[in-house]
Amino acid sequence: MKKYLSFFRLKFLMGLQYRAAALGGIATQFAWGFMEIMIFRAFYRADPAAFPMSLYATASYIWLQQAFLALFATWMMEKDVFDSIVNGNIAYELCRPVSIYNMWFSRSMATRLSRAVLRCFPILAIAIFVPQPYGIAPPASPWHFIVFLATLFLGLAMTVSLCVLVYILAFFTISPQGLQMIFITMTDFFAGALIPLPFFPAKMQSIMELLPFAAMQNVPLRVYSGSMTVYEMQRAIVLQIFWLFVTTAAGKLLCKLAQKRVIVQGG
């Protein structure tokens, strides 16, 4: 365990050094957040009663999404992992007395947390002072906030687990680019990154909520805004834990299979 905590600490401290990149990201996310809210505002003006969430709740969802983008954005996968698999440098990692899966998991979690720490507080601090209904609302209750923090951590672990699964699947492909494009497109759509899941038709939403992608950002952001009933929150948390176990187990099994069959060419 100490080995993986060391990987986590080193990667986390390394990520905190990129302050200029964080400032650029904050500016971009503010612009993107305001643009999304203005688009939704145009639809809400037509018929506010037709939407499952109020504009204030939707704005809160968007600001939280932008504040914690680094935790859930699947396009923020580590390029050096794919490069090491393609160019054969993965051989050096295989020689280490560590679990490849656990190492990638700890490094990926540290990278996402360090990026989120640099960006989330400025975004949330300013979004609080944006006038209603365009700013971020306070949590529905103290209990909702506690559940939000728990589901936020589970959503992060779920995102990392899926990304590490993609890293491992890259062992079985000639180029990981196609795999990345398919994975990013699917997660953006099914996780509520483009449109919150409550805006989809009821039958489609009920199916999407059962998929592993819904266990990522969809759950904590909706818990915070209070758009879930107690039963829906309980079911969502159970699904988060279930899919985290399934994807982690699948990743570790595939990792063992890949390590047995991997062939590194060159000298």
Image (spheres, rainbow, N blue to C red):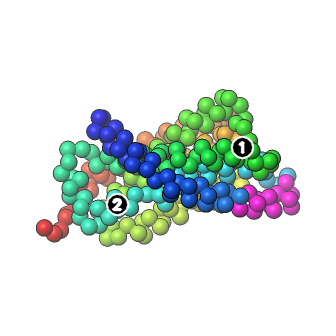
In the picture, measured across the screen, residue 30 lies left or right of residue 101, that is right
Residue 205 in view (yes/no): no
Q: Is residue 10 magenta?
A: no
Residue 40, horizontal then vertical, whole percent: 76, 59
Viewport quadrant of the C terminus: bottom left
Residue occupied by mark 2: 80
- Front residue of this view, candidates 122 and 199: 122
Q: Tell me if mark 1 has few (under 14), some (14-19) or many (20+) residues whose alpha carbon lies within 10 angstroms of its own.
A: some
Type of amino acid under label 1 = Ile
Q: Is residue 1 visible?
A: yes
Is residue 41 on the magenta stretch? yes
Q: Residue at x 58, y 46 (%)?
A: 120
How far from the left and from the top, in percent, is residue 35?
71, 62
Residue 36's place in the image compared with 154, above or below, is below
Question: Residue at (27%, 45%) from the top-left corner?
Answer: 99
Q: CA distance from mark 1 to mark 2?
A: 37 Å
Q: x and y percent of residue 125 in the render?
A: 66, 43
Check disc 2 and give the amino acid type: Asp
In the image, is 139 to the left or to the right of 99? right
Q: Return the residue nearer the eye: 6 or 178.
A: 6
Q: Nearer the viewer, residue 60 or 169?
A: 60
Where is residue 172 drawn, in percent x and y?
31, 64
**In the image, is residue 191 above or below residue 82?**
above
The mark found on residue 66 in the picture is: none
* Residues under numbered marks 1 and 2 in contact, where contact means CB atoms less than 8 Å apart: no
What is the span of residues highlighted in magenta in the rendered image?
A: 35-48
The residue labelled by disc 1 is 128
What residue occupies the far left of the structure in this picture? 267
